[in-house]
Image (cartoon, rainbow, N blue to C red):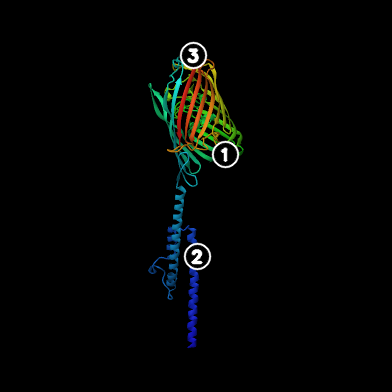
Amino acid sequence: MKRLAFLVALALLALVAARTSRATSIEDEIAAMKQRIDALELENRSLRESVSSLNVHESPASGPELDAAGSEAETKSEFEPKLSELEAELLATSDEQCLACEESQKEDLAMSASWHHGLELTTKDKDFRVHVGGRTQFDLGWFSAPDNVQDNINNPYRDGADFRRGRLRVDGTMYGTMDWAVEYDFFNSVNDSGSPHTVTGPTDLWWTFREVPWVGNVRVGSQKPAIGFEHLVSSRYLPFMERSYNQDSFYGGAFNGFQPGVSLFDNWGEDNLGTWNVGVFKPTNNAFGSNLGDDDWQVVSRVTRLLWYDCDGGRLLHVGGSVLAQNPMDDQLTFRTRDAIRTGLSAEWPVPASTGPIAGDDVQWINGELVGVNGPWTFQSEGLVSFMQDASPIVGGVTQPSVGTVMYHGYYAQVLYYLTDDHDNYNKATGTFDRVIPNRNFFFRRGRVASGPGAWQIGVRYNYLDLNDNTLDGGILNNVTCGLNWYWNPNFKIQFNYMATHRDAALAGDLGDGWINGWGVRFAHDF
């Protein structure tokens, strides 16, 4: 009896050892399976294929023949539940990871709204940004001019009111390194068969690719060619109602200052104190960015440097130079300017100086700029010289014999002073002035007195233009403009200007010569 009990005990120990061996083997297989599933990145379909290939989920009738001891049935009965638990756990983990990934992507692209001189939507990482804005400028003007000026000019000076600019703009950033801008001006005008009317034209309409190797930035589309400090300052930030005569005679003219093309630009030097810009453009003579000429090209380059920069721009000295070489559209240009205050549709503005159309296929401009800020004081000046080779007058649509090279030039100098504790804001990235931000905004509410003065600025500018040379004479203008600016806040200002212009019309018998006086007010809002 004892012997029988001993044999039974021995058999039981053998069975336990066999089971232990099988369990160890099963655990090893499970570990191997888990490694394989992990290697396949926990994909659900791959997991099912792997489990199916191991014949785990097949029914006993289709499986291998069971041995007498039932080892295959035992293996399957122990192995299958563990794999099912593992599969369920891994599937749950995979689903959680996918949901977390989706939530992360949604969070990255989620945008929040804020006011940044206009409505701005941005993601947390600033890789995506959309700004919605625009500008409105409403002008009033009054003029006084002698009869001989009024009788010998294309359009007489008349009192009036008009919307000088009305633009809508959407700009932003995509994918962290691509900026874009879409802006249209609704108050250009054309004179069609004697009937002036407004038209819509593009201004800033471009893409900028940032962080480009060896270059920095590449801009493609309608943009301002980089020539002249005043030209590159936005009309939102001008200290006088109009730019100097150089803008209308050279930089802007009939094409509104914007040209279609490609430019490369970046900062240079220690602390990014310098800027450079090189661009190739298709010159136009209209406000729509259109040119179908085969050989019409324009190359422009500008370099600037801050010789002194202190107090976050409260004190600075800026120098710059730019050059332009072009074959103008249709091989002709008209050098002309409107005055320092204007009212009415642009197609009906008086033109006190004009050469009329001149034929020529080779034009160069050289421009120099000097700007300084010392606390409330701002000094700004520029001068431009224009050369046109093989110039020929066009009379009645017929090109006359060449008179050779003609040289025209113009310059201005202006001094401004803040009566309040403010100063002009310089943008180191563009090498120009930026938005004025008063230290204390002006506002009032019913039943309360004004709680802030805003920013008050006074200034005076002398402006000179000479369009007379080599018998192709367009006149000489001397102008003094005085201004008072009241900035209520960073987005609204009122400007008061007085101008005195002496016109030498280059007409026989001094016809058209004389002094022109004008007074203007502008209400300007931008966002």
Q: Nearer the viewer, mark 2 or mark 1?
A: 1
Q: In x, y percent, where is residue 53? A: 43, 62
Q: Which mark is residue 31?
A: 2
Q: Upstream in the sequence, badge 1 or badge 3?
A: 1
Residue 165 visible somewhere in the drawing: yes
Q: Could you give the CA–CA distance between mark 3 and mark 2, rounded to whole angstroms?
A: 101 Å
Q: Could you give the CA–CA distance between mark 1 and mark 3, rounded to whole angstroms?
A: 54 Å
Q: Residues within 10 Å of mark 2 (few under 14, many from 20)?
A: few
Query: In the figure, 446 relative to 48: above or below?
Result: above
Q: In x, y percent, where is residue 89? A: 45, 62
Left or right of 307, for residue 18: left
- Disc 2 is placed on an element classified as helix
Q: Residues within 10 Å of mark 1 (few under 14, many from 20)?
A: few
The amino acid at mark 3 is: Leu
C-beta proximity under 8 Å, tags 3 and 2: no
Query: In the figure, 61 relative to 494: above or below?
Result: below
Q: Residues within 10 Å of mark 3 (few under 14, many from 20)?
A: few
- Disc 1 is placed on an element classified as loop
In this view, the residue in front, 435 or 326, is 435
Q: Upstream in the sequence, badge 3 or badge 2?
A: 2
For image coordinates 50% across by 73% down, the residue present is: 21
Left or right of 256, for residue 429: right
The amino acid at mark 2 is: Ala
- Residue highlighted by disc 3: 507
Q: In x, y percent, where is residue 141? A: 44, 24
In this view, the residue in front, 50 or 287, is 287
Res. 214 image quadrant: top right
Q: Could you give the CA–CA distance between mark 2 and mark 1, rounded to whole angstroms?
A: 52 Å
The amino acid at mark 1 is: Trp
Q: Which mark is residue 214?
A: 1
Left or right of 316, for residue 401: left
